Image (tube, rainbow, N blue to C red):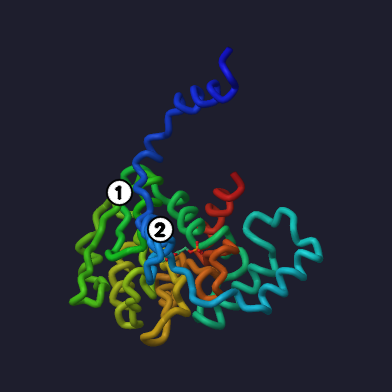
Amino acid sequence: MISFATHLLKYISMIELSERLKAMEESATIAMSRKSRELKAEGKDVISLSLGEPDFFTPQFIKDAAVEAMNNNFTMYTPVPGYDDLREAISMKFSRDNGLNYTKDQIVVSTGAKQSIANVVLSLVDEGDEVIIPAPYWVSYLEIVKVAEGTPVVINAGIEKDFKITGKDLEAAITPKTKLMIFSTPCNPTGSVYTKEELRDLADVLVKYPNIVVISDEIYEHINFSGKHVSLAQFSDVYDQVVTVNGVSKAWAMTGWRLGYIGAPKVIADACNKAHHK
Ligand SMILES: Cc1ncc(COP(=O)(O)O)c(C=O)c1O
């Protein structure tokens, strides 16, 4: 008699994973983090520069507010784009900290900035669409683009340029297939921060290509040691082309809470909302 376990093993071994998943590389960040855990377990003194985990804990007032919310039974399904008052609070944050005007219906909350980025990419990118990614970049950008069957177009920005691209670099990478650009400022992994002038230089190019959308990943907004943070969407002539991504993971040491959001042109916010629905 074949045991249940044998049945199960046979069944598992017949499962064929999708080509899409097989093409995904293991996240270098996760691999590094695992390695550092292994070395620590061997008693080695390791400084891990892998996962972007803040070196402080979620502030007490946030934990208290969460406990109070749970005690008030905020424990059920939320509206798909997030609670109205949360989206209003995010709208106020964008206005106060970034000078950005996003109404509530331009804001979509998700389970982390990573999911926000994935939603935007899946909403916009079709097979063969090109997505410009300045390097060094956060490893997940490339994998997300590949899952969407887009074609990553990497622009290398070396140390001599403080790991930042110029408008000229950007324009040289644009083709009729370019759909999207994804970058972060402050940048993970380099820590480089684009100045207002450098962003203006990029905006001067983008304004000539109104069909190109930019994901401006600003999750590290408050982990900035080199000057004031500037948002690309501040420039009114490219505001309609920019999706501003942010969240609470880094600024508030809430990596495990999984809360991210976008401020976006309404058509993209609606698309992400639709992607969430499904
Ligand atoms: C540049 C960048 N964007 C987004 C994220 C993801 O943030 P979240 O925890 O909100 O998904 C990370 C996490 O390390 C990151 O480094």
Q: Which amino acid is tagged 2?
A: Glu
Secondary structure under tag 2 reads: helix
Q: Quadrant of residue 45?
A: bottom left
Residue in the foreground of this view, choosing between 69 and 53? 53
Number of marks in picture: 2
The alpha-carbon separation of the residues under discs 2 and 1 comes to: 35 Å
Q: Earlier in the sequence, mark 2 or mark 1?
A: 2
Question: What amino acid is labelled 1 in the image?
Answer: Thr
Whether residues under marks 2 and 1 lie with C-beta atoms below 8 angstroms apart, the answer is: no
Label at residue 38: 2
Report the residue at 59% width, 22% height from top.
Answer: 4
Give the foreground label among 2 and 1. 2
Residue, x 49% and y 22% (percent of image)? Answer: 10
Residue nearest the viewer, comparing 23 with 9: 9
Relative placement, left or right, of 151 versus 6 is: left
Q: Mark 1 points at which residue?
A: 151
Would residue 131 be visible to someone looking at this image? yes
- In this orientation, which residue lies closer to the viewer: 273 or 53? 53
> Quadrant location of the N terminus?
top right
The local secondary structure at tag 1 comes to strand
Label 1 neighbourhood size at 10 Å, few (<14), some (14-19), many (20+)?
many
